[in-house]
Image (cartoon, rainbow, N blue to C red):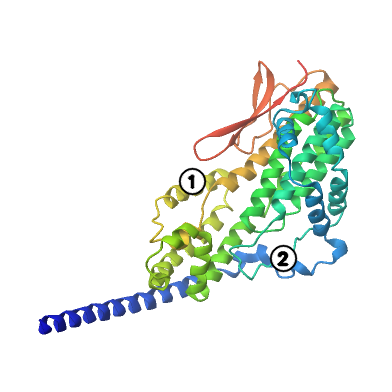
């Protein structure tokens, strides 16, 4: 009995020794490969992040952040009643709101004038940089201003619709410009959260413009509305900055103690962290092996988004399909810090498409006003398809076919005013 017990202990000790040897070897090999992958990251792959070096040193009189940040709580969140009214106006225009609801929404928007004025002062500053700590926990940089910007931006679109319905088209254009400025207060920030907030509010404004721009127009008014639209280069560099930030955060976590990586992983995966049985340090070789592939994938994504849109979208869709096949346990880095979604690329292109659609529609209206008829064909290219906008004759309209994901599209329409 004692002899069997002793041999059992010896066998267990041998197994533990073998495991320790294998773990140490795996740790050494994966650590060496990870160091090589980190060292191979080109210095130029993070040029867009140089602005973060002196982020919080901007002079107060040049920074509109404090004014925007004060405007958001002054405006407040939307209550259920007026939030519903504004949703209706954003979706279908001022005319879609029942007449008995309009006085209440008018009064509510009027009570937010002080918040609108503060935001306008912030928009008058040359820059906007909200206080951020980019180096403390870079995987989780809070941006509490995004919700306030969404509420304020939505109210500004509703106010523009109200002003246009009242015939105050100059006021409507000022409200739209201010809404774009609220969204652009995040334009220099690299995280995807603030990029998504900016792109989402831009798209909401552009969709609102399809209802805000009046049916009766002059040639001069067409030019005025065109000047409100964001230019195609408005979004240049924003996607590169976001992907460079992803690479920076991942490289930063993998270049330090693995305990810091696992802390970040636990914060971003709280449910899986609670269910975890094996100590995280035992998974260090797995994480480092996956980290080598993560660095390669992030570098490939960064190279991919520099390609022409259709080529980049095809490759990101392929990577997105592969991403969903990755095991969470064996790929903790890629499943958490590498998200090759084509969503942001498509979102930028959709924004460009809707802006181009509105610009083309206004140009067609101007042609009709000046010559008495619309152009025979559409030569303006839809950024989402690479082909001219679709021209329908019954009813007379221009249509954009925008991607909404890998498998389906969304249409936006400019209804031509003439016959």
Whether 406 is drawn above or below 281: the answer is: above
In the image, taking residue 360 as reference, residue 297 lies left or right, namely left
Q: Quadrant of the C terminus?
A: top right
Between residue 229 and residue 373, name the one nearer to us. Answer: 229
Asked if marks 1 and 2 touch (Cβ < 8 Å), the reply is: no
Which image quadrant: the N terminus? bottom left
Residue 355: x and y, percent?
Answer: 72, 37
Q: Position of residue 9 (x, y in %)?
A: 19, 81
Q: Quadrant of residue 380?
A: top right
Q: Residues within 10 Å of mark 2 (few under 14, many from 20)?
A: few
Secondary structure beneath dot 2 equals helix
Residue at screen point 44% across, 67% down: 292
Check disc 1 and report the residue beneath it.
317
Question: In this rendering, would 136 be left or right of 293?
Answer: right
For residue 357, what is the image quadrant? top right
Q: Give the number of marks.
A: 2
* Nearer to the camera, 291 or 6: 6
Task: Count neighbours of disc 1 (C-alpha within 10 A) and say few if under 14, some if 14 to 19, many if 20 or more.
Answer: some
Q: Position of residue 278 (x, y in %)?
A: 37, 68
The image shows residue 64, relative to residue 57, as above or below, that is above
Q: Is residue 111 visible?
A: yes
Q: Is residue 97 above or below residue 2?
A: above
Q: Residue 145 appears at what percent x and percent y?
A: 72, 54
User: Of callouts 1 and 2, which one flags the residue occurring earlier in the amino acid sequence?
Assistant: 2
Query: Could you tell me which residue is drawn at 67 percent across and 62 percent down?
Result: 48
Circle number at residue 51: 2
Tell me the CA gap for discs 1 and 2.
Answer: 30 Å
Residue pictured at 84% horizontal, 28% vertical: 103
Residue appearing at x 56%, y 57% in the figure: 302
**Does residue 40 appear anywhere in the picture?**
no
Disc 1 secondary structure class: helix
- Left or right: where does residue 417 sit relative to residue 316? right
């Amino acid at each position: 009995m004692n002899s069997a017990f002793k041999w059992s202990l010896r066998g267990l000790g041998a197994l533990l020794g073998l495991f320790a040897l294998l773990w140490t070897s795996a740790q050494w090999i994966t650590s060496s490969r990870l160091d090589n992958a980190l060292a191979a990251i080109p210095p130029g792959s993070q040029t867009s992040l140089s602005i973060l070096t002196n982020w919080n040193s901007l002079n107060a009189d040049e920074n509109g952040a404090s004014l925007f940040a004060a405007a958001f709580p002054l405006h407040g969140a939307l209550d259920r009643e007026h939030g519903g009214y504004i949703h209706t106006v954003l979706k279908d225009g001022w005319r879609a709101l029942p007449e008995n609801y309009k006085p209440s929404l008018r009064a509510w928007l009027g009570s937010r004038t002080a918040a609108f004025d503060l935001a306008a002062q912030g928009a008058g500053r040359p820059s906007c940089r909200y206080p951020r700590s980019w180096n403390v926990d870079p995987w989780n940089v809070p941006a509490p201003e995004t919700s306030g910007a969404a509420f304020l931006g939505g109210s500004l679109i509703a106010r523009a619709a109200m002003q246009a319905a009242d015939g105050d088209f100059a006021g409507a254009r000022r409200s739209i410009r201010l809404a774009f400025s609220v969204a652009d207060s995040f334009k220099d920030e690299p995280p995807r959260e603030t990029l998504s907030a900016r792109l989402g509010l831009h798209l909401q404004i552009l969709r609102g413009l399809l209802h805000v721009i009046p049916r009766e127009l002059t040639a001069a008014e067409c030019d005025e509305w065109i000047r409100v639209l964001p230019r195609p280069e408005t979004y240049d560099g924003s996607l590169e900055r976001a992907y460079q930030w992803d690479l920076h955060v991942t490289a930063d976590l993998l270049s330090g103690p693995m305990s810091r990586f696992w802390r970040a992983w636990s914060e971003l995966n709280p449910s899986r962290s609670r269910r975890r049985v094996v100590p995280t340090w035992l998974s260090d070789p797995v994480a480092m092996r996956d980290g080598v592939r993560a660095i390669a994938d992030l570098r490939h994504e960064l190279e991919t988004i520099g390609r022409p849109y259709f080529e980049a979208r095809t490759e990101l869709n392929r990577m997105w399909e592969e991403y969903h096949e990755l095991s969470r346990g064996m790929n903790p880095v890629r499943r958490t810090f590498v998200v090759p979604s084509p969503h942001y690329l498509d979102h930028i292109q959709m924004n460009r498409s809707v802006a181009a659609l509105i610009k083309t529609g206004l140009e067609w209206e101007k042609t009709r006003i000046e010559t008495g008829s619309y152009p025979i064909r559409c030569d303006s290219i839809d950024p989402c398809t690479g082909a001219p906008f679709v021209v329908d004759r019954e009813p007379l309209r221009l249509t954009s076919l925008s991607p909404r994901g890998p498998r389906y599209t969304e249409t936006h329409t400019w209804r031509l005013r003439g016959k």
